[in-house]
Image: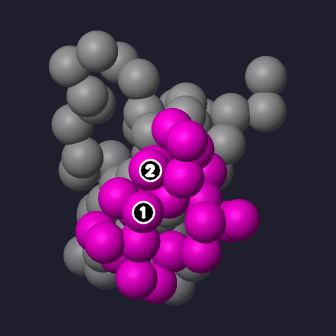
Amino acid sequence: MNKWLNYAVSNNSDDSIEPDEFVSGRAETPSESIICVDCGGNAHLLTHPPEDGVWQIGEVVAYRCSECRDRWDIVLAPDEQ
Ligand SMILES: [Zn+2]
């Protein structure tokens, strides 16, 4: 019964999320910087870490390249460890 209620809430908040594909929980910690795909420069993490230090799967973090000023949005993947 609880499971059914959770699905109903998810569907109401976002119709695009299929219940079978919906995942939640701890994500991998994003690195402080990544390599810019466009110019090979350093792109630094713009998004501040959550207060509890726990990143959530599906959370979007933004990077800004210090060379070309491009912005990169990365969706966090599940923590493999
Ligand atoms: Zn760049």
Q: How many other residues sit within 10 Å of disc 1, few (<14), some (14-19) or many (≥20)?
A: few
Q: Is residue 1 visible?
A: yes
Please indicate whether residue 21 sits to the left or right of residue 73 in the image: right
In the rendered structure, which amino acid carries the disc numbered 1?
A: Ala
Image-based side of 17 in relation to 69, left or right? right
Residue sitting nearer the eye, 68 or 24: 24
Q: Position of residue 45 (x, y in %)?
A: 33, 47
Asked whether the viewer can see residue 72, the reply is no
Residue 42 placement: quadrant: bottom left
> Of the residues shown, which amino acid type is indicated by label 2?
Leu
Residue at position x 59%, y 75% in the image: 18
At mark 1, the secondary structure is helix
* Secondary structure under the numbered disc 2 in the rendered image: helix
Residue 5, label in figure: 2
In the image, is the residue at mark 2 within 8 Å of ligand 1 by its beta carbon? Answer: no
**First to last magenta residue range:** 1-23
Q: Residue 59: where, in percent of width, then height?
A: 40, 53
Residue 70 percent location from the top left of the image: 31, 79
User: Which residue is at a point 44% across and 50% down the rendered structure image?
Assistant: 5
Residue 75 rendering spot, x and y as whole percentages:
50, 61
35 or 76, which lies in front?
76
Residue 65 got which mark?
none
Q: Tell me which corner region of the image, top left, top right, bottom left or bottom right, holds residue 22.
A: bottom right
In the rendered image, the quadrant that contains the N terminus is top right
Q: Relative to residue 46, is residue 45 drawn left or right?
A: right
Of residues 66 and 5, the one drawn nearer to the viewer in this rendering: 5
Above-or-below relation of 78 to 68: above
> Is residue 77 magenta-colored?
no
Mark 2 residue crowding within 10 angstroms, few (<14) / some (14–19) / many (20+):
few
Residue beneath disc 1: 8
Could you tell whether 33 is left or right of 77 in the image?
left
